[in-house]
Amino acid sequence: MKRDQNIKNDLIIRTLMGEAVERTPVWMMRQAGRYLPEYIALRNKYSFFERCQNPELACEITLQPVDIVGVDAAILFSDILVVPQAMGLEVQLIEKQGPLLPDPIKTAKDLERVRVADVDETLSYVFDAIKLIKQELNGRVPLIGFAGAPWTLLCYMVQGKGSKTFDEAKAFCYQQPEVAHQLLQMITDTTIAYLKGQVAAGADTLQIFDSWGGLLSKQDFETYSLYYIRQIVAALKDEVPTIVFAKGAWGSLKEMADTGAHGLGIDWCIEPHMARQFAGADITLQGNFDPAKLLSPIPVIEKEVTAMLKAFGPGRHIANLGHGILPNVPVDHAKAFVDTVKNFRHA
Amino acid sequence: MKRDQNIKNDLIIRTLMGEAVERTPVWMMRQAGRYLPEYIALRNKYSFFERCQNPELACEITLQPVDIVGVDAAILFSDILVVPQAMGLEVQLIEKQGPLLPDPIKTAKDLERVRVADVDETLSYVFDAIKLIKQELNGRVPLIGFAGAPWTLLCYMVQGKGSKTFDEAKAFCYQQPEVAHQLLQMITDTTIAYLKGQVAAGADTLQIFDSWGGLLSKQDFETYSLYYIRQIVAALKDEVPTIVFAKGAWGSLKEMADTGAHGLGIDWCIEPHMARQFAGADITLQGNFDPAKLLSPIPVIEKEVTAMLKAFGPGRHIANLGHGILPNVPVDHAKAFVDTVKNFRHA
């Protein structure tokens, strides 16, 4: 297991490894995002892919929440859809409208348009950004690398855009399971190489985001998602601690824990004691504050964050939201979330 | 308990009452909908509210799936948003775009624009439709009446349109809880009167749809949803059997069963044996086929429906989808779903 000995605040790494910690660590999904005026200033000047592909910009954005909000980890500023892009699909990220893949995968023939990416050729800008971020972080906190889970990437690659139900992606799997599995394996192979590249560049831990895992029945989650997540975790778990976040897939927490991942993300729709019961004692849980609750008055946030920390209990917990922070959250509310965690001590 | 002795196929009523049945009954959420060419023909001629408010049209649409697909119950053709409309809010239902409430509730002052509806004045067209449907059904199958749960109606009344997360509705609750509770109580009082009117007009059973209950934490679901559902069930459960369907709110199945409801709807993201474990033995479960699975080839549908029926076991189960049928499902696939249930016998 690789471990950067120069990190001063390594609470998140120690928590993932099940080691003793003085307090619960905290970060927020989408912490480098639109609720920060400093991020908006850069967004107004540069397109999404400029911000992603320019290492200096990606570094600056990645560090903003560390400097401004005081989180215990930085997470690489990027997007899960850089992988489909590297595989050969056109991806547009239009501000406020979400992703658009104008020429999605619909048939076996469409697979000819995608390939397992040569990540050093197509995604080297990410590795350059990671190297620069690690240098600029200078050991303050760990850097989290990430990728989308193959199922979630398939959703976008087939549906072509966001959706509440991703029916077209599901129909693709149900009608052409062999083609779906071919595509999922290509995404998996690309993702493993991509995450290995992130670790080689300096990522201290990795999170796999399966944002749409919760749309599948338990059996379909096993078939179309977990089978591939398992390959990714197996390839990476001895290099750095890995976190799997399959939003809504509470019914498979045990099976996700069995992959050997070090941490599991959970959302606010499952109570901490139920998540612990399902996942077992030997894994770190990450979550699970309702992002919309950060719109509450600050005293309510403080009270509810404290209740969450007590519900998880000491150790084996990384405080986080149950999904990405909302753009309309005031910065001082985000700070109240982080500070409440940092000031709390279990009795 | 009211019971129409003239119903020939009363499988659904008997299943809800926990009585012996020869086979599992079946219906489909949104069974009177866009997958039927006969429905599309009427949709092309009449606006949504024309179809809703004209008893002859509502009756014709309600009966279509009974005649064409052979389901074991009719469900009133209407929309949950007729209640906010009756309470004084403007509601537009634009084809393919979903609902729009151009002047939503944002503050205490906005409550002055809504009232507990006089249902006999504002919703008598629904009661007229029910009377006509009961006459035309002539005892073939029972008629299901329905309403939206107060939380789901608040979502639309505050957000003003559909949303993946209903953040504005949640922020309204978290920032102005007293105003939210006032509004929820007004919706509840209207809904109780509305459902009592449906029963008086002839509805044989009732379903309460909490489509967005699964967006809330367990504690918030209790505070903003179940507290009001409980009042509705208490007011109706001795008149006709009641079904509560709070999509995604698996963590509160036990508490929903404790309301005294006769049936609980569940979606495909929870396994039948887990739902039974949470809900207890003394309640009927309804569901839980993935609507997107109806896009599979027919032999796959037959195989998976059979697996679902075996997983639920005999008795105390009404076969249904886990959410509304999708518009692009071929009619013969819907028929395959219904016929597989009707032809199956537990060993």
Image (tube, coloured by chain):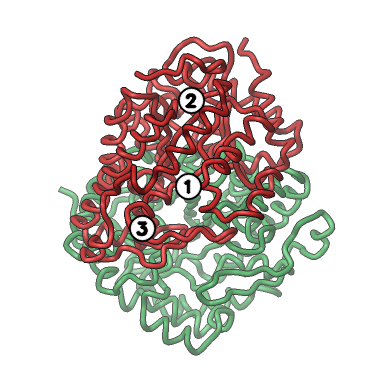
Chain colours: A red, B green
- Amino acid type of the residue tagged 3 in the rendering: Met
Under circle 1, the secondary element is loop
Labels 3 and 1 within one chain: yes
Q: Nearer the viewer, residue A318 or A236?
A: A236
Q: Which percent across, then down, holds residue B205?
A: 47, 61
Quarter residue B160 falls in: bottom right
Residue A210 falls left or right of residue A25: left
- Amino acid type of the residue tagged 2 in the rendering: His
Q: Nearer the viewer, residue B122 or B21?
A: B122
Residue A179 falls left or right of residue A170: left
Q: Which percent across, then down, holds residue B165?
A: 57, 51
Lower position in the chain sequence, tag 3 or tag 1: 1
For residue B130, above or below residue A300: below
Quarter residue A8 falls in: top right
To which chain does the residue with label 3 belong?
A
Q: Residue at x 65, y 20 (%)?
A: A342
In the picture of the structure, the residue carrying the numbered disc 2 is A273
Q: Which percent across, then down, holds residue A321?
A: 57, 35
Under circle 2, the secondary element is helix
Q: Residue at x 55, y 65 (%)?
A: B199
To which chain does the residue with label 1 belong?
A
Residue B262's label in the rendered image is: none
Labels 1 and 2 within one chain: yes
**How dense is the environment of label 2, judged by Cα within 10 Å: few (below 14), some, or many (20 and up)?**
few
Q: Residue at x 63, y 34 (%)?
A: A65
- In this rendering, the label closer to the viewer, 3 or 1: 1
Under circle 3, the secondary element is helix
In the picture of the structure, the residue carrying the numbered disc 1 is A79
**How dense is the environment of label 1, judged by Cα within 10 Å: few (below 14), some, or many (20 and up)?**
some
| Disc 1 to disc 2, C-alpha distance | 32 Å
